[in-house]
């Protein structure tokens, strides 16, 4: 290796280090985009109730004797496996990207007036609600916020997909 090539590598290294110190390390917003965190720390088996609300439409599901059933709207049925899949997708999410550390700009993520809200009921513990907002610009994920955290997360589309399937199965319009 020539001394010129070595000097070039050092110059690139120093430039990238400078960028990191100035742009990434000093900017809290840039750090948020690099943070990954657990979304929910709830075991699937601990969930015994699920409420999904879109606009004025509300679907309530309860686990009875280990089997999911729809309790509202009355007289409607959906596959227990479909409800189980929605709960599993909510509780088994891997670490997800944190896109904002606080909720100061919820409108940017479609969470000022969320498109839907999913509440997980647990016996003996307070419920946890998850508000779902807009799709990200690439259309590959959806913005979400837990009721117990000011953070805004970016989660995969599977949760929204199973939510859509649940509303379709019940003949509810997806508003």
Image: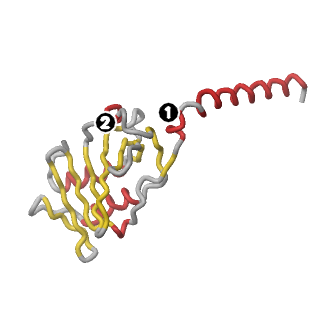
Report which residue position mark 2 lands on: 110
Please tell me whether mark 2 sits on a helix, a strand or a loop.
Answer: loop
Identity of the residue drawn at 70% across and 30% down: 17
Residue 102 or 56: which is nearer the viewer? 102
Report which residue position mark 1 lands on: 29
Q: Quadrant of residue 50?
A: bottom left
Q: Residue furthest left?
A: 75
Q: Quadrant of residue 141?
A: top left
Distance of label 1 from label 2 (alpha carbons): 18 Å
In percent of width and height, residue 4 lies at 87, 22
Relative to 159, 95 lies left or right = right
In percent of width and height, residue 138 lies at 42, 34
Q: Dot 2, crowdedness within 10 Å: few (<14), some or many (≥20)?
A: some
Q: Dot 1, crowdedness within 10 Å: few (<14), some or many (≥20)?
A: some
The quarter of the image holding the C terminus is top left
Does label 1 or label 2 sit earlier along the sequence?
1
Identity of the residue drawn at 14% across and 46% down: 56
Please tell me whether mark 1 sits on a helix, a strand or a loop.
Answer: helix
The quarter of the image holding the N terminus is top right
In percent of width and height, residue 109 lies at 35, 35
In percent of width and height, residue 166 lies at 23, 55
């Amino acid at each position: 290796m020539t001394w010129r090539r070595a000097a070039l590598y050092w110059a690139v290294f120093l430039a990238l280090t400078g960028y990191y110190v100035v742009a990434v390390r000093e900017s809290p917003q840039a750090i948020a985009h690099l943070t990954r965190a657990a979304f929910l720390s709830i075991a699937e088996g601990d969930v015994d109730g699920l409420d999904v609300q879109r606009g004025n439409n509300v679907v309530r599901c309860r686990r009875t004797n280990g089997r999911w059933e729809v309790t509202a709207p009355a007289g409607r049925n959906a596959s227990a496996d479909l409800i189980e899949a929605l709960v599993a997708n909510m509780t088994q999410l891997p670490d997800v990207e944190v896109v904002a550390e606080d909720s100061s700009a919820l409108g940017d993520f479609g969470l000022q007036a969320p498109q839907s809200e999913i509440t997980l009921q647990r016996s003996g513990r307070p419920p946890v609600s998850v508000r779902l907002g807009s799709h990200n610009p690439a259309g590959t994920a959806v913005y979400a916020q837990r009721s117990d955290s000011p953070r805004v997360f970016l989660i995969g589309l599977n949760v929204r997909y199973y939510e859509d399937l649940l509303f379709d199965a019940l003949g509810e319009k997806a508003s």
